[in-house]
């Protein structure tokens, strides 16, 4: 519910609390972003960024840039999204904010992959993997390994891609992350059949199927269709 955040912003503004106002605007944008209301989210991210610049709050500026960049990348606005994420990343790296650095790197890697800049994407995902391991953040480790796998797959470097997908599967399963365990199995199956390992591909598909969401089931079925062809 965005209403409590909006009320908090009004209270912060009334009391001249610019830092809290800025944080609240970004939080409100994120609330709309999660709901899928991207136009409203963009409006509040832009307001948060304006406040952060006006009141010289670089941390809030980086936070607003990262959120705005993430939204733009989701909407397919790759160039603008990448520029905003790069600005946020530079500040987080200078300040030693490791968690935020990892979040920015995965967004950069995905954007670079979409642009077809595979070498840059690999560097971003590999940096993210290094940061995630230092943090001991298994969720970020899994996302980095999957990201590396997707780039290698796009380059048709299938044995290397399979290695990272299987690493992601092991990390996700160890941490009890059922969703990414299933997606790692899906990714592995996509590579296995192209390597002629149809039996292993089918096993991976079967293992990913129980409890799969509608979206995941559709992707599993698509792999089965390609295998059959």
Image (spheres, rainbow, N blue to C red):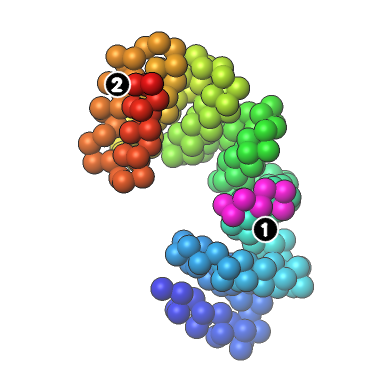
- Specify whether 145 is left or right of 90: left
Front residue of this view, candidates 23 and 150: 150
For the point 69% across and 27% down, the residue is 119
Image: 83 above or below 207: below
Residue underneath mark 2: 202
Instruction: Give the magenta part as a residue range.
Output: 74-80
Among the 4 quarters of the image, the one containing residue 58: bottom right
- Specify whether 151 is left or right of 54: left
Front residue of this view, candidates 67 and 43: 43
Among the 4 quarters of the image, the one containing residue 206: top left
**Residue 122 seen in this snapshot:** yes
N-term mark: 1 or 2: 1
Among the 4 quarters of the image, the one containing residue 139: top left
Name the quarter where the C terminus is drawn.
Answer: top left
Image: 26 above or below 146: below
Residue placed furthest toward the bottom: 14
Name the quarter where the N terminus is drawn.
Answer: bottom left
Residue underneath mark 1: 65
For the point 63% across and 80% down, the residue is 17
For the point 35% across and 40% down, the residue is 218
């Amino acid at each position: 519910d965005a209403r409590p955040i909006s009320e908090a912003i009004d209270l912060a503004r009334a009391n001249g609390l610019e830092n809290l106002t800025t944080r609240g605007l970004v939080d409100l944008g994120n609330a709309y972003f999660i709901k899928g209301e991207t136009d409203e989210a963009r409006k509040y991210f832009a307001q948060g960024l304006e406040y952060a610049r006006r009141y010289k709050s670089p941390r809030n500026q980086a936070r607003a840039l990262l959120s705005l960049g993430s939204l733009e990348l989701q909407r397919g606005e790759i160039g603008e999204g990448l520029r905003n994420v790069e600005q946020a990343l530079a500040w987080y790296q200078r300040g030693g904010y490791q968690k935020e650095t990892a979040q920015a790197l995965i967004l950069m890697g995905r954007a670079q992959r979409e642009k077809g800049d595979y070498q840059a994407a690999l560097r971003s995902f590999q940096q993210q993997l290094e940061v995630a391991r230092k943090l001991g953040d298994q969720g970020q480790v899994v996302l980095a390994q999957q990201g590396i796998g997707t780039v290698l797959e796009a380059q048709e470097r299938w044995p290397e891609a399979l290695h990272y997908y299987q690493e992601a599967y092991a990390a996700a399963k160890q941490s009890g992350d059922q969703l990414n365990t299933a997606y790692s199995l899906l990714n592995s199956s996509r590579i296995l059949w192209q390597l002629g390992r149809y039996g292993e591909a089918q096993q991976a598909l079967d293992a990913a199927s129980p409890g799969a969401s509608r979206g995941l089931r559709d992707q599993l079925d698509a792999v089965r269709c390609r295998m059959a062809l």
